[in-house]
């Protein structure tokens, strides 16, 4: 007897089982061929993407957002009238009195004084000029500094 006939008798596979075994063998060989082709014929990519710039921007924005959220939590527990702080910086040269009133430690009176100072002296040239306004000392300025700009 030849080898194939002996194997058929020993294993006793049906026709459908033989076809399925043949199909699995072909699929396995095709997968191995594709893997070998990708490994030896297609060259690997030469340049990987550099994520350092986007990572540093993400870190910077996360730190700013974290400080805003921390300040929001402190303000919400300290003053029930003010519920949220601005997420983006407020421009001192264009902000309305209502926008300035939303800043931490700034009430209606201080907001009026900021607008009056801007009217009398012109546009702010530096954020440090806030210290010239009555009621804004070093401590309040440090709190406000992260929420205002002069752009």
Image: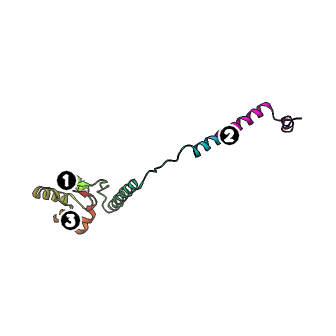
Residue depth check, mark 2 versus mark 1: number of the one nearer the observer: 2
Q: Quadrant of the N terminus?
A: top right
Task: Find the residue positioned furthest to the left.
Answer: 120
Q: Nearer the viewer, residue 122 or 4?
A: 4
Label 2, residues with CA under 10 Å away: few <14, some 14-19, many ≥20? few
At 58% across and 45% down in the image, what residue appears? 40
Q: Position of residue 59 (x, y in %)?
A: 39, 58
Task: Give the extent of the magenta segment.
Answer: 3-31
Residue depth check, mark 2 versus mark 3: number of the one nearer the observer: 2
Q: Specify whether residue 49 is in view.
A: yes
Q: Nearer the viewer, residue 143 or 2?
A: 2
Q: According to the image, label 2 marks what residue?
A: 29
Q: In the picture, residue 61 is in which quadrant?
A: bottom left
Q: According to the image, label 3 marks what residue?
A: 136
Is 110 magenta? The answer is no
Name which of mark 2 and mark 3 comes first in the sequence. 2
**Image position of 149 (left or right of 118):** right
Classify 12 as above or below 47. above
* Real-space Cα separation, disc 3 to disc 1, in angstroms: 16 Å
Which element is circle 1 on?
Answer: helix
Q: Position of residue 97 (x, y in %)?
A: 19, 53
Task: Find the residue positioned furthest to the front.
Answer: 41
Q: Are marks 3 and 1 in contact (CB under 8 Å)?
A: no
Q: Nearer the viewer, residue 86 or 79?
A: 86
Q: Position of residue 12 (x, y in %)?
A: 84, 36
At 22% across and 55% down in the image, what residue appears? 100
Q: According to the image, label 1 marks what residue?
A: 97
């Amino acid at each position: 007897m030849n080898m194939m006939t002996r194997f058929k008798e020993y294993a006793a596979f049906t026709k459908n089982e033989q076809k399925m075994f043949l199909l699995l063998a072909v699929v396995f060989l095709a997968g191995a061929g594709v893997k070998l082709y990708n490994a030896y014929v297609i060259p690997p990519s030469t340049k990987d993407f550099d994520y350092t710039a986007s990572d540093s921007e993400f870190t910077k924005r996360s730190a700013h957002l974290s400080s805003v959220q921390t300040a929001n939590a402190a303000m919400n527990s300290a003053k029930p009238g003010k519920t949220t702080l601005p997420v983006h910086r407020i421009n001192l040269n264009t902000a309305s009195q209502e926008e300035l009133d939303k800043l931490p430690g700034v009430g209606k009176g201080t907001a009026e004084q900021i607008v009056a100072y801007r009217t009398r002296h012109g546009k702010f040239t530096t954020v440090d000029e806030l210290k010239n306004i009555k009621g804004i000392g070093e401590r309040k300025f440090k709190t406000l500094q992260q929420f205002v700009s002069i752009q």
